[in-house]
Amino acid sequence: MESKQIYARFILEILGAPKEYIEQTLKEYVAKLKKEGVEIKKEKFEEAKPADKLFSTFAEIEAQFQDINDLLSFCFEALPSSVEIIEPLELKINAPQLTGFLNDLQARLHEADLIIKSTEAHNKILDLNATAVFNNFVTHLLKQGPKTEQELAEETGTTAKELKPFLKKLEQNNKIKFDGTKYTT
């Protein structure tokens, strides 16, 4: 690639709570980028806005990079939600540079995919274990005596609607019985 500097605009977003914390964290992150050598020319921070039970904010920054490799490294590390190359209007990249970029991209995608699959597997195990503990808790409560759906909901800290699927499953597996008004073991 030609040795020209690249000037680009980015949007960096953050989601979290409390509001003041994410605003400060984003400012600290941009300051960290500067300390690490990212040549930031402009920065503008937006006030955090409510997003469900969390808050969302973003910073718009403009930065200058020595070459495409520096730009791509920044994008991989900072993960901006938006990238706009302002200058130069045309970029030329040779095949070995493009190959290197594509291999880096593929490696990162494979790493992200592995993390997602691992997290999904861990979540599945946690869900199974939590369900088993919850089912054991319900069964233990019923060993103390027959209870209505509402009584079980109150003692488990759930609603009757949330509890119903667990009770049906326990009933199908012959772990508990329902006589029309109360559950028993």
Image: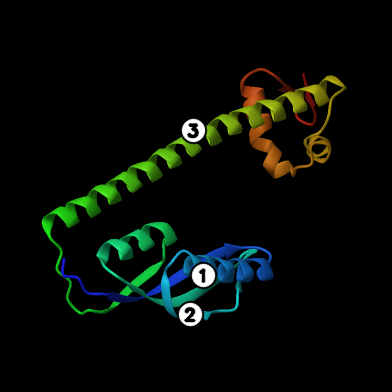
Q: Which residue extends farthest left?
A: 95
Instruction: In this rendered view, identify the residue nearer to me: 166 or 122.
Output: 122
The residue under the point 69% across, 65% down is: 18
Vertically, is 100 above or below 63? above
Q: Which residue extends farthest right?
A: 144
Alpha carbons under labels 2 and 3: distance apart: 40 Å
Q: How many numbered tags mark residues here?
A: 3
Instruction: In this rendered view, identify the residue nearer to me: 155 or 51.
Output: 51
Disc 1 to disc 2: CB gap under 8 Å? yes
| Percent x, y of residue 96 | 14, 53
User: Would residue 71 be found to the left or right of residue 37 on screen?
Assistant: left
Mark 1 is on which residue type?
Val
* Residue with the mark numbered 3: 121
The residue under the point 60% across, 74% down is: 48
| Percent x, y of residue 143 | 83, 19
* Residue with the mark numbered 1: 30
* Residue with the mark numbered 2: 43
Mark 2 or 3 closer to N-term? 2
Under circle 1, the secondary element is helix
Question: Which color scheme is applied?
Answer: rainbow
Instruction: In this rendered view, identify the residue nearer to me: 170 or 12.
Output: 12
Alpha carbons under labels 1 and 2: distance apart: 9 Å
Mark 3 is on which residue type?
Ala
